Image (cartoon, rainbow, N blue to C red):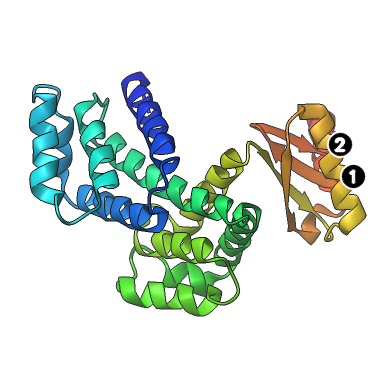
């Protein structure tokens, strides 16, 4: 997002946090905001009307009232009225922000229940399951019709095995990926959960699974380096041969045997 939209999104996030502190029904609020996301995503004309800087802010808020009053709760309606009064760099930024607020509400719900860490881990694992299974990738593809079938598949895979917030977010990613691959949407949710926990995410690729002590030592070492809480997510890839490849905070630390061989090969041929 560009500056104007970033400012509007930050203002909306602050308003949401204040609303959450009032004891608002979080499950209802999340559903209301996801519903508004779908409405905006499905109508380019509506997005333009609600973000057009030539329209008076109060006129745009009144349009939200006419469309949604009585259909969503007062909390969600107030947030949306505030959103459309602000200025946006692009119409799509409004939709992205409303969806981001809905995700934040579900993560806050998980946080209050002491499940946030579990939700983060479950979303990560499910994203890897989808990305590693061609059949699931095809089933969740935007080219594959049938939103209800996708939701049923998610629920068969996760219900009873994952937190309710994980299931709801996975359903959202499968049914409404908004032009993205489902696993990419899930990765975005993982990153949102990590931000909620004020953590950095370290994506680690290893030749073999890391046992508990090695996982803990790596996490502690990264914490010392970055001076921040670190969530270590591990993928196993036998092709790296040995060592670790770590991606964190935009940096890639490649200590794998394969990585060292590539470096040596480039040095010899450079």
Label 2: few (<14), some or many (≥20) within 10 Å?
Answer: few
Determine whether label 2 and label 1 are within 8 Å by CB: yes
Q: Which mark is residue 78?
A: none
Residue farthest to the right, as pictured:
213
**Residue 214 rendering spot, x and y as whole percentages:** 90, 51
| Badge count | 2
Image-quadrant location for residue 157: bottom right
**Residue 251 rendering spot, x and y as whole percentages:** 69, 31
Left or right, residue 193 beside residue 22: right
Instruction: Describe the element under mark 1 as helix, strand or loop.
Output: helix
229 relative to 71, above or below: above
Q: Which mark is residue 217?
A: 1
Instruction: Describe the element under mark 2 as helix, strand or loop.
Output: helix
Left or right, residue 263 beside residue 250: right
Q: Is residue 178 visible?
A: no
Q: Residue at x 21, y 36 (%)?
A: 81
Q: Is residue 111 visible?
A: yes
**Residue 175 rendering spot, x and y as whole percentages:** 36, 64
Label 1: few (<14), some or many (≥20) within 10 Å?
Answer: few
Q: Which mark is residue 221?
A: 2
Q: Residue at x 47, y 75 (%)?
A: 155
Q: Nearer the viewer, residue 263 or 67?
A: 67
């Amino acid at each position: 997002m560009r500056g104007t939209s970033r400012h509007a999104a930050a203002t909306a996030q602050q308003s949401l946090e204040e609303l959450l502190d009032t004891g608002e029904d979080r499950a209802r609020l999340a559903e209301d905001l996801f519903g508004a996301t779908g409405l905006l995503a499905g109508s380019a004309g509506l997005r333009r009307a609600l973000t057009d800087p030539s329209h008076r802010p109060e006129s745009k808020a009144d349009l939200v009232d006419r469309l949604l009053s009585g259909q969503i709760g007062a909390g969600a309606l107030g947030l949306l009225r505030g959103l459309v009064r602000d200025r946006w760099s692009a119409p799509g930024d409004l939709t992205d922000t409303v969806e981001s607020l809905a995700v934040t509400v579900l993560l806050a719900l998980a946080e209050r229940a002491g499940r946030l860490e579990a939700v983060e881990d479950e979303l990560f694992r499910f994203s890897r399951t989808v990305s590693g299974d061609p059949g699931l990738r095809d089933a969740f593809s935007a080219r594959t019709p049938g939103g209800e079938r996708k939701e049923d598949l998610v629920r068969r895979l996760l219900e009873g095995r994952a937190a309710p917030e994980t299931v709801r977010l996975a359903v959202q990613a499968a049914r409404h990926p908004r032009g993205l691959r489902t696993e990419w949407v899930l990765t975005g949710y993982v990153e949102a959960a990590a931000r909620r926990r004020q953590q950095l995410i370290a994506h680690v690729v290893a030749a073999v699974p890391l046992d508990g002590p090695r996982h803990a030592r790596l996490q502690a070492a990264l914490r010392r380096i970055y001076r921040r809480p670190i969530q270590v997510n591990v993928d196993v890839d036998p092709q790296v041969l040995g060592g670790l490849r770590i991606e964190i905070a935009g940096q890639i630390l490649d200590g794998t045997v394969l990585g060292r061989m590539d470096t040596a090969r480039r040095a010899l041929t450079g």
